[in-house]
């Protein structure tokens, strides 16, 4: 609850001045939104929301740290965190694929690319779409075409990326 957006979050939000930035994140926090990003899809849900256990379309903002037994929705069912637990279906994965299939550039920041189905999203953009991976420990991306690796932490790597994208767009 007390976490603040870091430099990486702020850079992505700032990039909206020059680019149509759409963020598909596995993170369940709201740091991208608090940094100012306007198009954020949380494929693993949002920790500051709860949902009905019988009707997943009933989603509520929560302003406290925890949910308690007896916290119920308007239909009388227990509320649960609005997040995807391991082993559960990722309901927004199809929407994420739609967004990514429209990308001119695809950027992966700060992930090992080991958690599926999200890790497979790097294969969605066609071979003509330039892809970037920003992480100090570059994951195995040997099967990915048209990729550039930036072995830096998010804040440093995103500055390099912004400069690189400006170069592409001016060319």
Image (cartoon, grey):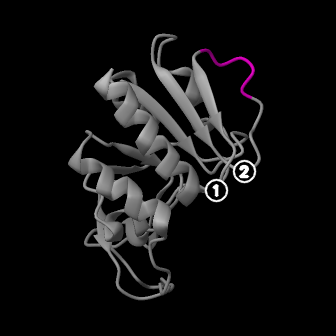
Where does residue 111 sit, x and y in percent of width and height?
65, 48
Disc with the residue nearer the chain's start (2 vs 1): 2
What number is the disc on residue 133?
none
Q: Is residue 128 above or below residue 165?
A: above
Q: Is residue 142 above or below residue 121?
A: above
| Membership of 143 in magenta stretch | yes
Instruction: Write the start and end of the magenta stretch as one range.
Output: 141-145
Q: Residue at x 39, y 30 (%)?
A: 167
Q: Residues within 10 Å of mark 2 (few under 14, many from 20)?
A: some
Whether residue 90 is visible:
yes
Q: Mark 2 near mark 1, Cβ–Cβ under 8 Å?
A: yes
Q: Position of residue 140 (x, y in %)?
A: 77, 31
Observer-nearest residue: 146 or 53? 146
Majority secondary structure of magenta residues = loop
Q: Is residue 139 left or right of residue 46?
A: right
Residue drawn at point x = 61 percent, y = 37 percent:
133
Check the image and report above or below for 15 versus 33.
above
Q: Does any portion of residue 91 appear in the rendered image?
A: no
Kindly identify which residue carries mark 2: 136
Quadrant of residue 59 within the rendered picture: bottom left
Residue picked out by circle 1: 153
Picture quadrant where residue 38 is located? bottom left
Tell me what residue is drawn at x 51 percent, y 42 percent: 90
- Tell me what residue is drawn at x 57 percent, y 21 percent: 123
Is 46 part of what is drawn in magenta? no
| Cα distance in 3D space between marks 2 and 1 | 5 Å
């Amino acid at each position: 609850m007390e976490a603040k957006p870091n430099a990486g979050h702020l850079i992505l939000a700032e990039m909206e001045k020059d680019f149509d930035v759409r963020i598909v994140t596995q993170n369940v926090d709201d740091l991208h939104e608090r940094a100012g990003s306007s198009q954020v899809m949380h494929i693993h849900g949002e920790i500051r929301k709860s949902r009905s256990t019988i009707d997943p379309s009933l989603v509520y903002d929560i302003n406290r740290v925890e949910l308690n037994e007896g916290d119920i929705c308007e239909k009388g069912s227990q509320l649960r965190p609005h997040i995807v637990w391991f082993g559960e279906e990722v309901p927004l994965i199809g929407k994420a694929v739609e967004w990514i299939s429209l990308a001119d550039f695809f950027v992966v920041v700060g992930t090992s690319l080991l958690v599926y189905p999200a890790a497979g999203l790097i294969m969605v953009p066609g071979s003509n779409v330039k892809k970037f991976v920003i992480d100090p420990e570059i994951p195995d991306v040997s099967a990915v075409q048209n990729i550039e690796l930036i072995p830096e932490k998010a804040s440093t790597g995103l500055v390099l990326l912004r400069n690189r994208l400006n170069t592409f767009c001016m060319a």
